Image (cartoon, coloured by chain):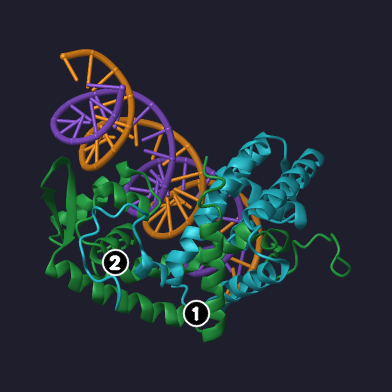
Chain colours: A green, B cyan, C purple, D orange
DNA sequence: AGATATTTGTTATGGCGCATAACTGTTATG
DNA sequence: CATAACAGTTATGCGCCATAACAAATATCT
């Protein structure tokens, strides 16, 4: 607050500061996320995937025969939005909508062999690019970052939601 | 990979895991950001602001007489998107578009008294809500989180952008 | 000075992620 | 058997972001 008062900065060349905003965790989170998100989208595009379809494919690969509503809950999104995602994955022959024996409402989602393979390849590519993007952080810092992010995520799990 | 093989989990009650996704920094970042973003949007709505208009207002308050292109650069967005934002703020009498003496192309954006006041109030409310959302993190952890996020943000500043 | 390039703001347009609401068919519950 | 609860679906709109093309003003270069 001491140096660099409230002068008119119009003439100053360099990047215009957003110090006030950067003090907000939400804003800093947004900037960091936006960087990684843009890059991830570009990488996934090379596999014919988008962020949401990749995410869904990951969950489906991890837990076979799950239903769409479970998928929605896992990804913290509304059921309605999973429909298009699952449609896309199904039409690309990456997953299958199987019927479940005693419940004709729900589907049992299962990844095809092609789906699992694409998932593996895309994940490798993503991790490679994340390693580049996060090159400034050492292993300990990355681990700490993840720990803190998960803490935020799990905190409100029962709390604010509504 | 050892325990909890590839069984059909359809019957298992609890939340469906997305462990594989959680190992990606981008995904964990997304989840944490989404939590804070949703909450922040709700808070700002009470002030008649959205996240982008609040962000712009913050930068304009901090550095008076800045131009729209500088605003765009500060917020890492395209110039074209600042137009609607500045329009909105101007129509709400929170900022003014002043002409600059020797350049008839650009505007000198300046917050009004009402704009500065609203910004102050909204910021206080935002900080209060962030304190709640981040209650699980102690002061040291919050500071470390910010440091790591800024590191990510500033890393690619010269790098990947293209 | 005059042709050319660059900068600033603007408009139009589309994509992506997300939410809500209303509906159908199916299963569970009283 | 009537009613409620659930799974999936459809339609729709909002918010944020990017790209492309354009007019007016300014900078640059010969």
Disc assigned to residue A108:
none
> Looking at the image, which residue is at 73% across and 42% down?
B96
**Whether residue B77 is visible:** no
Question: Are there few (<14), some (14-19), or many (20+) residues within 10 Å of tag 1?
Answer: many
Q: Nearer the viewer, mark 2 or mark 1?
A: 1
User: Label 2, label 1: how many angstroms apart (C-alpha)?
Assistant: 20 Å
Q: Is residue A13 left or right of residue B80?
A: right
Give the secondary structure at mark 1: loop
Which residue, given by chain and number where applicable, does mark 2 sit on? Answer: A45
Q: Position of residue A71 (x, y in %)?
A: 30, 53
User: Residue B113 appears in which quarter of the rendering?
Assistant: top right
The foreground one among B76 and B44 is B44
Identify the residue shown where x is 58% and y is 44%: B41
Determine the residue positioned at 56% across, 60% down.
Answer: A152
The reply, left or right, for residue D1 in relation to residue B38 is left
User: What is the quadrant of the N terminus of chain A in the image?
Assistant: bottom right
Q: Residues within 10 Å of mark 2 (few under 14, many from 20)?
A: few
Query: Is residue B29 visible to the viewer in this orientation of the structure?
Result: yes
Q: Nearer the viewer, residue B71 or B19?
A: B19
Q: Identify the subunit bearing mark 1.
A: A
Asked if B150 appears above or below A106 in the picture, the reply is below
Q: Foreground: A28 or A73? A: A73
Q: Indicate whether B46 appears above or below A121.
A: above
Query: Residue at 24% of width from left, 52% of height from top?
Result: B11
State which tag comes first along the sequence, 2 or 1.
2
Instruction: State which quadrant residue B42 falls in.
Output: top right
Q: Which mark is residue A134?
A: 1
Answer whether labels 2 and 1 touch (C-beta < 8 Å): no
């Amino acid at each position: 607050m001491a140096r660099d008062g409230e002068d008119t900065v119009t003439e100053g060349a360099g990047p215009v500061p957003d110090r006030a905003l950067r003090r907000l965790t939400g804003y800093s989170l947004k900037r960091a996320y936006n960087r990684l998100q843009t890059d991830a989208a570009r990488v996934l595009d090379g596999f014919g995937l988008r962020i949401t379809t990749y995410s869904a494919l990951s969950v489906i690969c991890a837990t076979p025969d799950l239903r769409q509503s479970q998928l929605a809950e896992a990804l913290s999104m509304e059921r309605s939005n999973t429909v298009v995602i699952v449609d896309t994955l199904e039409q690309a022959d990456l997953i299958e909508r199987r019927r479940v024996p005693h419940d004709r409402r729900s589907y049992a989602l299962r990844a095809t062999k092609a789906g699992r393979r694409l998932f593996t390849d895309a994940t490798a590519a993503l991790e490679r690019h994340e390693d580049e993007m996060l090159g400034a952080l050492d292993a300990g810092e990355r681990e700490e970052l993840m720990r803190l992010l998960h803490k935020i995520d799990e905190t409100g799990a029962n709390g604010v939601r509504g």
